[in-house]
Amino acid sequence: MPRIPAAFQREAVVAIAAIGLGVMHARAQPPAKPGPIKVYTAKKIVTMDPGWPEGTCVAVQDGKILSVGRTMDDLKPWLEPKGAVKAIAPYTIDKTFEGKVVVPGLIEAHGHPLMGGMLYRMPLLAYLPTMNPYGPEFPGITSMEAVAKVIKDHLATVKDRTQAVIFWGYDVVAMGKHLTNTELDAMTGGEGGVPVMIWDASEHFVYANTAAMKKAGVTNDALKINGVQAGADGKPNGQFLGVTAGSYILVPQLAPLMAPEPARASMKHLMDMSWKNGVTTTSELSLGALGVDSGLKLFESFYNDAAVPMRCVVVCDATAMLAEKKDGAVAFVKSLEKRSTDKLIYNGIKFFADDAFLSLGMQVTNPGYTDGRQGLWITQPGQPLVDAYRPWWEAGFQIHTHANGNGGIQAVVSALAALQEIKPRFDHRFTIQHYGMSTPEHCRRLAALGGLASVNPYYIYTRAEFNAPLVGTDRASTAARLRTLVDAGVVTSLHTDSPVAPPNPLEEMWIAANRVGYFSKQVLAPGERITAMEAMKMVTIDAAWTLGVEDKVGSIAPGKFADFTVLEADPLSVEPMAIRDIHVWGTVVGGEKFPATDIKPLAMAPRVEPVADATPKEAAEWLAVFTENGEGGHAATLASRYGTRGALLDVNAIAAHSDQCTMGFWRAAGPLLARARELQSR
């Protein structure tokens, strides 16, 4: 095919680089001298600094907070210094937030940007409504008939009937039953039908039809794997319960979704969902679970993109690191800290104790479950758990542990006590993640040992009424304790563990302050409610504390990143039941505004300003190439990968496209095409 004229390529690349690449480089390298100061004014600024709790203006310079003022007079030492000292920089005043409330950038203290986005983009079988950042929410599926219809309707659109089709969100507790291969075969065309896997809402259970088991090579030998279930005939029945069994059949089928383009699309989906809800710092609490080196490459490429309006704190998955790096795992994870940037911060290691809360695979102690079921361990309690922790504890890591049932929490607290006997540590930030079903004694002992908690409030809001028949009304209602933790002195954060729930800090606060059930609308365990201020701490400064980044984010204070969430009302002043209804204008990250109205679906290409003139001949040659390839040509455009201006900030991709004349890049720069058409018409 004809090549795009070199001169036109050079002009386009230079122009696009001027728009984007210069910004990225400016942030990556400290400026030689302080840049200009921007002052944001607001109706109210909530700082979360108890000594300077409010303001109406904040000065920002070089992406960080310079000073917070109750009035503009408080900023004069920086803006209009007296005496012989000259003003350190020119300043401007931005009144965009004049009638709004600015709070510290909200934090998702336990998320999964890749897996969460991946699952939200799969065909859904979720029982409850599910947020879509680009349009109406998914309404939810509440009957087996509806499940079968969604599966059949989707399979009717599938062209490649040899690849496994994965659905997500089936809620085994809400639906009241496990699925089997026999049931799925009836929905999917029998043994010779499309391979189908159902990934449940907890992400810990997988159900497969016969075709999927055949494709995965499942034989009777698989019954030796913890969690692989057998039917009456003694053969695998399509139920793969728990992380070990689920990963065995599912992970090999995820390879197509882990390719760079679909993986970035998944991360963008969850990023936009988070951005829409005011999140400025998210987290990945199991990096490596879907591949260590590929995960690192993906996260570093995505979050270090200057156009991505979010930071991410990364905690590595211990099992994955040990499997791939073996004896070098501890040293390898430690080395990642040196790769941290302002946008992507490595800190900590993650373990798993018992199984899932949503599927009720967690360990529940005496009197157990009402139906007599037995929970699952991911890591055996007692000495095996202590031994797993020990090398990381002794190396000084912050340790996070997934624990859901009161049996799991008991095992983790006891292991922490054993570690403190082996090597006492202060400010270790050992954090129990999820903290589902617990006792007051667990809270007090965790506090005595210096431990922290990160709690999923959706365990009370959307699960208590499902769980009461199986664990008792009292234990279901006191799940996700908060008042007991706060009164015991345990620093606590809130999270959604997306995709367990969409990242929505205002709704997390609302649940924490009100504790109403999703179905009954009744208050559940009112003694565990907390104040709006306590809840706000749990999605700002205390969330930063449990992630180990409180020196960077979590409050609006001098020296921290200028990350703000901009709201239409003050969550500390409205009635507690109104907190989640507050509209989010958008965010400020590193001092730059990111209104939520800028969120666009993946298919929408970014706008790029026209570049310098090309000759009519160059334009004609370019259009000839474009026409030859047509809209069905190189469809994997940078815009389809990212859907934001970040498409224009990938240095390697730009170089490759320019050198190889891959038309997808030039189509992403739509206005360039318009300019070429204009030149051709002269």
Image (cartoon, rainbow, N blue to C red):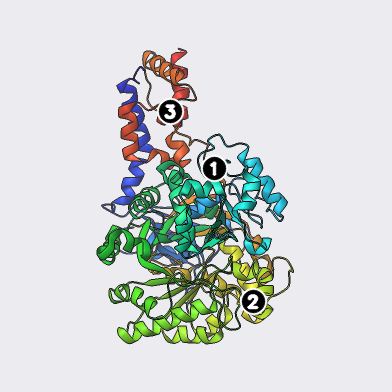
How many numbered discs? 3
* Percent coordinates x, y for residue 45 in the rendering: 53, 65
Tag 1's secondary structure? Answer: loop
| Circles 3, 1 touching at the beta carbon (< 8 Å) | no
Looking at the image, tell me whether mark 3 or mark 1 is earlier in sequence order. 1
Residue at 52 percent of width and 40 percent of height: 602
Any mark on residue 471, and which? 2
Residue at 56 percent of width and 74 percent of height: 374
Residue beneath disc 1: 600
Residue 464 is left or right of residue 563, and the answer is: right
Find the distance from the CA under tag 3 to the CA under tag 2. Answer: 55 Å
| Circles 1, 2 touching at the beta carbon (< 8 Å) | no
Considering only vertical position in the picture, is 92 above or below 367?
A: above
Residue 493 is left or right of residue 473, and the answer is: left
Q: Nearer the viewer, mark 3 or mark 2?
A: 2
Considering only vertical position in the picture, is 15 above or below 589?
A: above
Residue 648 is left or right of residue 473, and the answer is: left
Few, some or many C-alpha atoms within 10 Å of disc 3 (few <14, some 14-19, many ≥20)? some
* Percent coordinates x, y for residue 246 in the rendering: 49, 58
User: For the residue marked with disc 3, what is the amino acid?
Assistant: His
Quadrant into which the C terminus falls:
top left
Any mark on residue 634, and which? 3
Find the distance from the CA under tag 1 to the CA under tag 2. Answer: 43 Å
